[in-house]
Structures are given as structure tokens and as C-alpha cells.
Image (cartoon, grey):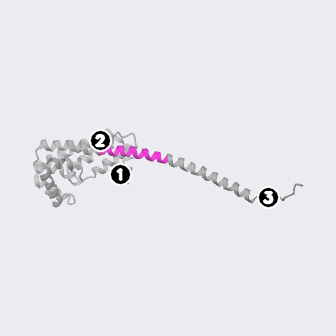
Amino acid sequence: MHVQEWLETVPPLAIYLLVGLVIGLESLGIPLPGEIILVSSALLASQHGEIDPFVLGACATAGAIIGDSIGYAIGRKGGRPLLAWLGGKFPKHFSEAHIATAERSFQKWGMWAVFFGRFVALLRIFAGPLAGVLRMPYWKFLTANVFGGILWAGGTTAVIYYVGVVAESWLKRFSWLGLVAAVLIGLTSMLIIKRKAKKAQTAHREPEPVGAGE
């Protein structure tokens, strides 16, 4: 079943909690489809008034910030052995090559890697734990975490929601235009057919003989 179709069967409160939980766990370092859940929920909110986009965005933002903070604390305490353990549990996501790539990004960009990492699937999973492992000062991490979480989670919710609203409005408008066009085309075709039929009937009518009335 498609994610959005499944979400339609879930009560709004459960959707808020689900979005916050999935994004929180993903930010903590567990590879889950947080972005897919968020985008699907925001699109669903644009189609159903029961889901409040502001509450949805707030839950997504809270999950992102809290999850990243917990990931930072775990990474700071676990150190590099934690990355080795994660590599054994999730080799596809926490391979040595991926860890090396993420580490180079952190060394080059510092706290900006946490901020912009929100918008990159790989760094979104790594950001919290790796920042803790690399002993990034907490105030730098927290600043980047909060602003990145607000911009990514809140911004994604807002953009997808309003795109969904506009798309639905245009679809409705085009459906009405299509109906009007179909009616006009039908009436025009009917008039043309009637006119041609009348012409054909006139053309095939036999003329009266000359002098028949005398």
C-alpha cells in the first residue's frame, strides 16, 4: 500500500505522533524514511482539513531537534566504537566509506554540516551521532540543530502543503474548464450536424415540375 493511502486510514493525532517519532528516530541515527513520511503527511494535510499543517510542522520540527540532540549525546558517550557497532547493524548506511564521507564534511564545514545536513539523506542520519563522536561544542551543534530542524521540517511541511493546495485548486479549475469545454464542443457538434442534415435534406428534395400547378 502507498504511504499516503495508508496515512489516510490513520487518525490525525496518530499522524502527528508518527511524523515526530519517525523523524526523531531518523535524526537519532536510525535509517528510517522520515522525509517520505513528512512529505506524504503534508500532502495529505493539503487535501484533508482534519490535519493541521502548523501542528504537523511543529511535530516534525520537534522530532528533528530532539532526535538529533539524543543522537549527539549517544555519539559523544559512545565514541568511535558506536560507529563501528552501527556499521555492523546497518552496513548499507553506516559503511566505512559513508562514515568517511560524512566525517570529511564535518571537518570541512563544521556546524554548517549539521545545518545543511538536514537536507541530505546521508548526513541527516549521521549529523547527531557524528557531531557527538567528533566532540563538536554543544552550543554550536544546538544552534545548527535548531535552525536546521526548523528550516527543514517546517519549511518542507509549508512548501509541500501549499503546493498541494495550489495543485488541487488547479485540478478543480481544469476539471470545470474541461466540463464546460465538453459541453460547448457537444453543442457545437450537434448544431453542425443539424445544419448539415438540413442542407442534405434540402439538396435531395426533388424540385417541382414546371407547369405542374397550371
Residue kind at label 1, given as amino acid type: Val
Q: Residue at x 16, y 50 (%)?
A: 129
Asked whether 207 or 98 is in front, the reply is 207
Choose mark 2 or mark 3, whichever is in front.
3
Residue kind at label 2, given as amino acid type: Gly
Apparent side of residue 18 relative to residue 79 in the rendered image (left or right): right
**What residue is shown with label 2?**
57
Q: Residue at x 18, y 48 (%)?
A: 114
Label 1: state its secondary structure.
helix
Q: Earlier in the sequence, mark 2 or mark 3?
A: 2
Label 3: state its secondary structure.
loop
Q: Splitting the image into 4 quarters, where does residue 105 fall? A: bottom left
- Residue 164 x/y as whole percent: 38, 46
Real-space CA distance between mark 1 and mark 2, rounded to the nearest whole angstrom: 18 Å
**What residue is shown with label 1?**
3
Evaluate whether residue 10 shows in this view.
Answer: no
Label 2: state its secondary structure.
helix
Choose mark 1 or mark 3, whichever is in front.
3
Residues marked 2 and 3 touching at CB (< 8 Å): no
Evaluate whether residue 7 shows in this view.
Answer: yes
Q: Residues within 10 Å of mark 1 (few under 14, many from 20)?
A: few
Q: Residue at x 12, y 43 (%)?
A: 138
- The magenta-colored residue range is 156-175
Q: Residues within 10 Å of mark 2 (few under 14, many from 20)?
A: many
Q: Which mark is residue 207?
A: 3
Q: Earlier in the sequence, mark 1 or mark 3?
A: 1
